[in-house]
Amino acid sequence: MNYLWILLAVSFVVSAVGWFYFIYFFSVGYGLSVSALALTIAILFANSMTLPSAILCGVLFVYGLRLAGYLLMREKRSESYKKILYQPANTTKKPFFAMMMIWVSCALLYVGQVSPVSFYLYNLKGGIPTNVVVAYVGAAIAAMGFLIETIADAQKNRAKKINASRFVDKGLYRIVRCPNYFGEILVWTGCFIFCFATCCSVWQWVIASLGYIGIVYVMFSGARRIELRQKETYGNDPEFKAYIKHTPLIIPFLPIYSVEKYSWLKA
């Protein structure tokens, strides 16, 4: 259990960047926390590290740094993103208690997300049987998700440079409207699969499941915000109407075209 307290302490320290600017709890602080946690796990369990767990820790470390760097550069270069980032809802000073609750929630969520690989390594160190094939599958899915998210961000940036006022429907965006969020879901699905590569205890399953469900909820909530924002911006465009009618929102080939009516996804 000591390793979980260490991970939680790291998560609290790194995500504290959100105290400088509220939205960083969920953006820059999120990316940096994931990287820091992956590095911490690699250090704590260096003697019991396996190749698939090393691959996953590496993916998570690079994923977090890339995300934090991408968001910072986007904040610096994109005027449209600045308008979203610095809208009144984000710049208005929040009550201290609310900030504390957000900080605690984020720190706990980030630990829950990375916990499967720590459980895998902890159980392996304790002599509990593990399935290396399942672990490789999880690492491969996470790596694929990272690649998809990276490509999606690059394709969107390229399309916006060509025509900043048009919605993006090229590349991966032909298949799904939020391929970057889909990629992120894959990253954490791959991580969660590590729970199936070892005999997790009940409390390990609870922590890992809450982390996984939490981030999937956040991704669908983010997709809903994008849907509402795009509807407001492009809602009268016939091409956009045809695009959203036939292109799934977040999971390719899964016929979920809108989550607008699901107000419970608001976060």
Image (cartoon, grey):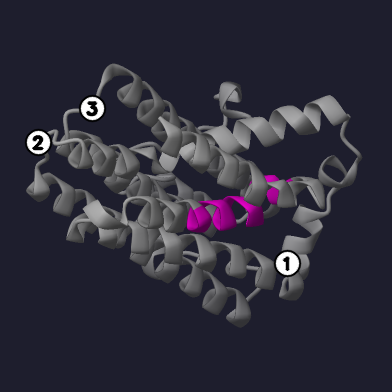
Foreground residue among 216 and 177: 216
Residue depicted at 19% across the width and 61% down the height: 51
Q: Alpha carbon of mark 2 to alpha carbon of mark 3: how far?
A: 10 Å
Q: Residue furthest right?
A: 93
Q: Earlier in the sequence, mark 2 or mark 3?
A: 2
Specify whether residue 89 is painted magenta. Answer: no
- Asked whether residue 21 appears in the rendered view, the answer is yes
Foreground residue among 169 and 55: 55
Where is residue 94 shown, x and y percent of the image? 87, 34
Magenta residues (range): 23-36
Q: Is residue 16 above or below residue 208?
A: below
**Kind of residue at disc 2:** Pro
Q: Is residue 146 left or right of residue 9?
A: left
Q: Magenta: predominant secondary structure element?
A: helix
**Kind of residue at disc 1:** Glu
Element type at mark 2: loop
Residue beneath disc 2? 129
Q: Earlier in the sequence, mark 1 or mark 2?
A: 1
Q: Alpha carbon of mark 1 to alpha carbon of mark 2: how far?
A: 46 Å
In the rendered image, the quadrant that contains the C terminus is: top right
Q: Is residue 52 left or right of residue 171?
A: left
Closer to the eye: label 2 or 3: 2
Element type at mark 3: loop
Res 165 quadrant in image: bottom right
Where is residue 208 shown, x and y percent of the image? 37, 31
Closer to the eye: label 1 or 2: 2
**Kind of residue at disc 3:** Cys
Residue beneath disc 1? 75
Specify whether residue 34 is painted magenta. Answer: yes
Residue beneath disc 3? 200
Q: Alpha carbon of mark 1 to alpha carbon of mark 3: how far?
A: 40 Å
Closer to the eye: label 1 or 3: 3
